Amino acid sequence: MEDLVSINNLNIEARTRAGTLKVVNDLSFTIKKSETLCVVGESGCGKSVTALSLMSLLPEGILKVSSGDILFDNTNLAQLSEAELEGIRGNEISMIFQEPMTSLNPLFTVGEQVSEVIRRHKNLNKEKAWASTVDLLDAVKIPNPDKRAFDYPFQLSGGQRQRVMIAIALACQPKILIADEPTTALDVTIQAEILALINMLKQETGTAVMFITHDMAVVAQMADRVVVMHPGKKVEEGTVHEIFNNPQHEYTKSLLAAVPKLGEMASKKYPEPMRLVGEKETKALKPIVGTNEPLLQVNNLVTRYPVKGGVLRRTVARVHAVEDVSFTIMKGKTLSLVGESGCGKSTVGRSLIRLVEPTSGDVNLDGQNILSLTPKDMREARSNIQMVFQDPFSSLNPQRPLFDQVAEPLRNYGTVKREVLQEKIGDLFDRVKLPRSFMQRYPHQLSGGQRQRIAIARALALNPKLIIADEAVSALDVSVQAQVLNLMMELQVDLGLSFLFISHDMAVVERVSHDVGVMYLGRLVEIGPRQAIFRNPQHPYTQDLLKAVPIADPDKRKSERDLNFKPLPSPIHDLTHDPAPSEYKEVAKDHYVLTTDCGY
Amino acid sequence: MLQNEEIEEPAIKPVKEIFQTFFKSYSAVTGLIILIGIAVMGFIGPLFYPTDPFDMVWMPFSPPGADGFLLGTDYLGRDILSQIINGARVSIAIGFSAALVSCFIGVGIGSFAGFYGGWVEEILMRITEFFQVLPTLLFAMVIVALFGSSVLSITLAIGAVSWASVARITRSEFLRIKELDFVLASRSSGSNNMALIFRVILPNAAAPIIVQSALLVGAAITFEAGLAFLGLSDPNVISWGQVIGSNRVYILDATYTVTFPGIAIFITVLAISLVGDGLNDALNPKLRSR
């Protein structure tokens, strides 16, 4: 087939204070008409920069194409004037971005934003442009498009906004659509729908797609061909089957080894660490057995946030973030809570250590009722439960050296004498496998994975019994994510820790947990041993959620017919709303399914 | 590639980086040099130019350059150059200490309002708004008139009327930072509220507060000049505002008697805002990489 885009020996340089830095190094690849090319690599590998250079949108004065050329439809983009480029951008090449929350203009209705593109490139009058706008919104499956066109971006959900972005991108039937991590910020169910939508539109219109992602599972879902990039260079290129079934380059192999694949733990009763490329083959991967002694018992936990309004700032409604949730965590075991954003899983974690005050319920840690403690006793009890947060870039104080940050809990509780503090912190650095020379550094000198290790070291400082990991690996690159997961599992074995693992990533959850709870709209809809939940899901929501997860195997693609999600109902209710208690049926040993209504 | 890279990199303190950025900016360094020069002039200058600014040393209204007086003499025959040299001390001292006073009040009120929220915030912010809408010069005049015009009462009066902006900035920074995960992390590792406010959040909120306080120094110097112009200055010490105030009647006959102290105020305030701009660029991480 004919080449639509061909990139030849492209070099891109970045000008920094330290001098020029090669961001893209001698990169060549082609995109054929109506194929999907996935460019995959970890953050900072130059994949987004390549896409921007294809749009001739590199930020001036910071990034510059130093040599090589980009041919689009046999025209050299570097020789075109700015006016000619404007005719191509959005018309023949269009792009969708990662963050649907910020890529639409909040001051115009979505209809205006779609029709603006049509009118600029197609010289249609207002009425005709509006008619094709409505058709487009219909094509991207926005319900009631003639009414929703008058909505402002804030009135739409994240998934719908990304659909509008796709409508804008496809408004002029471009020859190529560049999608830069379009589903990374979305929930797995919405991701599945958007991926299916892009696939469907590609088949209908014959547009070529350049799909940029870090997620191998998404690559397996989307790609015809794959380009693997590693710091600025192309390390491997091939069809999706070649890449997944017979990877050649070491980096591709390690990338694939680091991705947890849904289903690969199905035959194992206990979680075990991942085998990473480059580790000794003889290293035994021991299953993590744990104990059957309960550590934390949560009964009928309810957390509601007040919604204030009116002149007197009175409570006018309540957000029912957590509704009647009960579970038990055993010593040395991991319970995972999964669900979409807004389902209340993070609020459960924060309620347990009373960072938010629960409305009612019982939290029992090793015989101590946490919710009835005075603030002073609560402070003591917190040393038994520590937290690791999602974003390693905001969870460390930028103004203090790492030594002080890890030592902070020890100093707060005064448990360790000044003389042995240095040694104790050194041990913690060894534990999380960071060199002791890092102690006097500041967070901005560390990579994301290193920061997350510091966060774990800080959580370990007080010898807690339970660690709440709130999306602790979601912000990390896959290879780093695998290392951090392995570290957490090692610590679990060595120290007998229990984890409450909060995550939206089903594959990661399958890898680390003994037990799994699925949450929807504040309720636990299903809870049980990991194998039971993944092999034999009983609640319709769990079944749909598992269907939506992309699998890192190109032979297991999903089509849009498999998917059917309802938008999440609002958890805000007026003050008189008194929801019914949750009732469960035990379908197998320890496997409970919600029988009452949860809104799904 | 899956191993930890162990590059031996020295620890880069954020503070050091800020200094480096600051000293790269020509305008900020120029401002700082002028400011240091003026301070040196005020504190050491009298040793080299020992003429007493209150002494009637020559004929009144001797024009600049004539009779050996570089900047001339005022309506009582006092040496204006000596008045400017000695006035620098008082003007700068009042400027900095008044800014310090408003910084203390503003940071205290703003941080508690931002951290605790709820009714604490409501009450503290209503008080702040009260001070914000008050005609500041009038209020300062009332304080000075009540407590007498001494350097101390003037400093406190200026500090007491100009802290509202610092309080608002501190509060908004606290509202932003207290939601960040590292504050939650610090709380879950057992920090109490005072530690959270002063050891965790305040250092991270410092950048805009420092910039605002630097600009307040300039504002306080002009404020002092305004009070002195209206006759509310300490009669025992000389300040630039006082020189302008006492000569204002002769502005048409002997322009230079008010022009030179005016230029001195202008240069000082300009230098301070250059330094403030430089601080803003150095402390703002988004601008820092440019």
Image (cartoon, coloured by chain):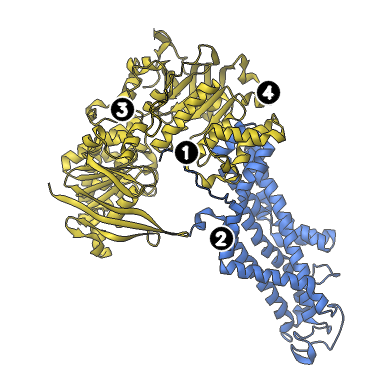
Chain colours: A yellow, B blue
Residue at screen point 78% across, 81% down: B80
For the C terminus of chain A, give its image quadrant.
Answer: top left
Asked if both marks, 2 and 3, belong to the same chain, the answer given is no
Query: Mark 3, chain letter?
Result: A
* Residue A362 against residue B40 in the figure, above or below: above
Q: Nearer the viewer, mark 1 or mark 4?
A: 1
Residue A84 lies in what quarter of the image?
bottom left
Q: Do tag 1 and tag 4 residues touch (Cβ < 8 Å)?
A: no
Amino acid at circle 3: Ala
Query: Mark 1, chain letter?
Result: A
Amino acid at circle 4: Asp
Q: Nearer the viewer, mark 2 or mark 1?
A: 1
Q: Secondary structure at mark 1?
A: helix
Drawn side of residue B88 relative to residue A106, left or right: right
Q: Secondary structure at mark 2?
A: helix
First-in-chain label (3 vs 4): 4
Amino acid at circle 1: Gly
Q: Secondary structure at mark 3?
A: helix
Q: Do tag 3 and tag 1 residues touch (Cβ < 8 Å)?
A: no
Query: Mark 4, chain letter?
Result: A
Mark 4 Cα shell of 10 Å, populated few (<14), some (14-19), many (≥20): few
Residue A72 x, y percent position in the rendering: 20, 55
Mark 1 Cα shell of 10 Å, populated few (<14), some (14-19), many (≥20): many
**Label 1, on which residue?**
A449
Residue B201 lies in what quarter of the image?
top right
Along the viewing direction, whichever of A437 and B221 lies nearer the viewer: A437
The outermost residue toward the left is: A1
**Label 3, on which residue?**
A548
**Label 2, on which residue?**
B21
Q: Nearer the viewer, mark 2 or mark 3?
A: 2
